[in-house]
Image (cartoon, coloured by chain):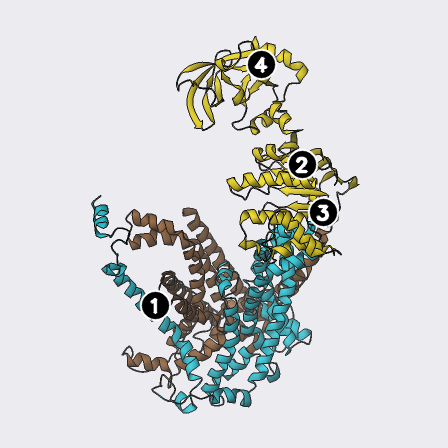
Amino acid sequence: MALVEVKQITKKFGAYSAISNVSLTAQDGKFLILLGPSGCGKTTLLRMIAGLELPTYGDIVIGGKVATRLHPKDRNIAMVFQNYALYPHLTIYENVAFPLRVRGFSGDIDKKVKWATSLVGIEHLLERKPRQMSGGERQRTALARSLVRDPSVFLLDEPLSNLDAKLRHSAREELRQFQERIGVTSIYVTHDQVEAMGLGDRICVMQGGVVRQLGTPEEIYLNPADTFVASFIGSPPMNLISDEGRTIGFRPEMFLPESAFDPSEALYRTEFTVQRIEYLGGDRILYGMVGASLPSSKAIARLPATIGTLPEVGTTAKFAMRLSDIRYFDGEGKAVEQSRRHEARLVVNG
Amino acid sequence: MAEPNTDLPGDRLLAYLALSPSIAILILLVAVPMVTVFAMSMQHISLGELSGPFVGLRNFERVLADPAFLNALGNTFVWVFGSVAIEMALGLGIALLLNIDFRMRGIARAVILTPYLIPTVVAVLTWHYMFNDIIGVLNYLLMAVGLISQPLLWLNSTSMAMFSVILVGVWKFFPFVVIALMGILQAIPQEQYEAADIDGASALQKFWRITLPHIMPVFLLTALLRTIWTFHKFDIIYLMTGGGPIDATTTLPVLVYQQGFVDFALGRAAATAIITFAILGVLLAVYLHLMKRAEARQ
Amino acid sequence: MSTTELSLAGSQPGGLGRYNRQAADLHYVTSRVMVYLLAFTAVSVIGFPLFWMVICSFKTSTELYQFPPAFLPHDWTLTNYRDLFIQTNFPIYFVNSLVVAGGATLLSLVVGGLGAYSLSRFKFAGMRTVSMLTLLCYMLPEVLLVIPLYLFVVDLGMADTLISLIIANTAFTLPLTMWFMRSYFNAIPASLEESAMIDGCSRFQAMRKVTLPLALPGLVSVGVFSFNHAWNEFLFALVFTSSETKKVLSLGLATWIGQDNIYSWGMLLAGAVLVTIPVVLFYLLVQRRLVVGLSEGGVKGE
């Protein structure tokens, strides 16, 4: 078990900076997610922690030891690659035994392999070659191979992205339980925000080589640090409406017909012209324009099925949201601090 | 490259260490000889010598003024364009045929590709025996079916020899075209033909509008490779005719050999070799230009 | 509409519908006949010299010189093969060819394989140039190189040695190996090696335990191409070697052509068959990769 610290890391490829001055800490035994769109630098960061790339500036510290220039094999980390990187010429058994063999493990290799493979439920497939396995089985093999030698840090690079949607969901569940059971510090790269929210103890949202926000899933969802995080997290994303150099934001599921609220609540009222309705079973997504006191702009509302009456397409209805659910962002898109919110709110209301 | 490159401490050293033997050999076996051949081309090297006094461009002047050079140049063009044109046409036809599914296609393909695999000297031996004026099976067969009335002097007449050599060259090397085109033919998505069927295209239309545009880049590249290789092909001509009768099949590479290792005029041979290389270079430049234009048009 | 009803009417409940014979289509039948006719013609015309070579190598000398020729030998004989080994230096040539082709192949595989690995896995200044230069080497006319190489061989006192042929052949087989193996290594995901390094391998161990086994088919294929190139090579052999004990097969057999008063056609053809056998055997080994390798521009034109 170990703490992983990333200290002021910058990575340049020629003139291009893939990572600019990033610092963060993966806490001991916790699940940290690196989340961001493709090209945000999250995989590069993971590869530097693994020792596959050398940071241009800054240091990687693993378990209190500076590891920046350590060879990957000397870091006691394990990594699950996006394509699983199973050795095609070896059987599943040999794949899992590989880390033990190359490290000259002195104990009972057979016992360790059986233990690791039974943990992920592939103990009956040991004689197969990787190409004879399904995607889910390969992913489990990669997991078994990475945990067989008790690494102190677990790195996972989009390990679920090659699975189909249904399998991905159950694999996510297993992965989370599995991590809790063995309690290894885990760093997990993904571009899928649902995966990130479901798996992470903490999420680090990255974009353009910098950390946009680091926090628990709740913090990131409820109080996005900037408009990028606000629009990247949540499906559909947070409604963002620009108004006099500021941006106000509200989640679609917080934006409901006025009748859905208790009249005693502190509400912000507006009008919503519905242009299209999508039925998603449990929810309905309403696309339309807000107006009235706000500058006319596109917005989305997500209404749970418990709200019986829907406004019809083409009509304008009274909609509202709680004042406490509104988020404010300044001209650069940064979230306005709690202390300054009051001020901003007055401006919007006035 | 899609895969990111690993960049670890010590990798750079390893990269250069692994590459340096290759580079060293290539420098010693290719770069240094290239420089040497230029140096030799500007020396007067007498019989039995390996170097001689510097004479500037005199070797080049002598070579270019030599009727034997012009003859060889003409022969080379006949040899190259004759061979490549027939190889490409035949290769395309056979590739299209082998792209159709039929029983025993595997055997047919194996037989058709074999000439490419066999050593040149074997091909030459076999054809020599078949071309034989007196006992050759080729004359017998052609006379039997009535195509000719008396035996042809395949290799021993100045008018026939080039044709015969081209015939052997085509037989030996057209399978390369077949292999290259078969690969790309199989890569054409079947859906395109099915869509064309539904749109009511005829077989000929499908060939012109789907097959040909698809294979064109590979077709041109194959023709380019065949042109280069045919241009400096030495062994098949030398072994079939030795450049004869008289000089009827003396192409530039054969001329270089004769100057260098029969007349032992290494300076002159070097000059001829460089001119040959330069002509090939011009040919390639023209060809690449045409190919770029063709690609731009698509 | 009506078609649906028709086929429904003709079918038994739970049984099959009307059988639609493909062969009943006249157009289809004609085109199939054409295909078989064309294929038969192509195979017999192209295959005839091969057939003739093999068949005639089993003919007695009387039959070999008889006109009109008989298509199948009246008396099958192995005399030609026996004479080849007893009366000629064929066995020496054969061994020499094995040494030269084997040596050049081994040298290219070891040196070129490492070089290709470096070109594929690392980024460094001039890497693209090196890759392009290897391709260029591969296009150079042999007659251009043979003159200066002859000079070096004589200067170094290596004339009439097999080692000079091994080295000269490397000038072509090495670029071939590098170019081919570079694309082969490119196709092996770098993440496999990275994974091996995280699992505890050094870079070198990762190469040996993961990349090398995966690259083996590629090495075998390009080894066959190289071997075949060197096995066929004629010009260097012609210029560099002269004594009987240093001749390789291509040169040895070539000097017999035109001397049919000394060596019979039967022996020559028997020799031709024997020279072909290793090449064909090797190609059978890599048959499936042949098309891929060749269409990637991976092989020289001989």
The residue type indicated by label 2 comes to Phe
Q: Which of marks 3 and 4 is in front?
A: 3
Q: What element carries label 1?
A: helix
Chain colored cyan: C
Q: What element carries label 4?
A: helix
Q: Residue type at mark 4?
A: Leu
**Circles 1 and 3: CB atoms closer than 8 Å:** no
Q: Which of marks 3 and 4 is nearer the N terminus?
A: 3
Whether marks 1 and 3 lie on the same chain: no
Give me the C-alpha separation between circle 1 and circle 3.
63 Å
Of the numbered discs in the image, which one, if any, rests on residue A150?
A: 3
Q: What residue type is labelled 3?
A: Asp
Location of residue A166 in the rendering, given as x and y in whole percent from the top left corner: 51, 40
Badges 1 and 4: C-beta atoms under 8 Å apart?
Answer: no
Of the residues tagged 2 and 1, which is closer to the observer? 2
Q: Residue C39 carries which label?
A: 1
Residue lying farthest to the top in this orientation: A350
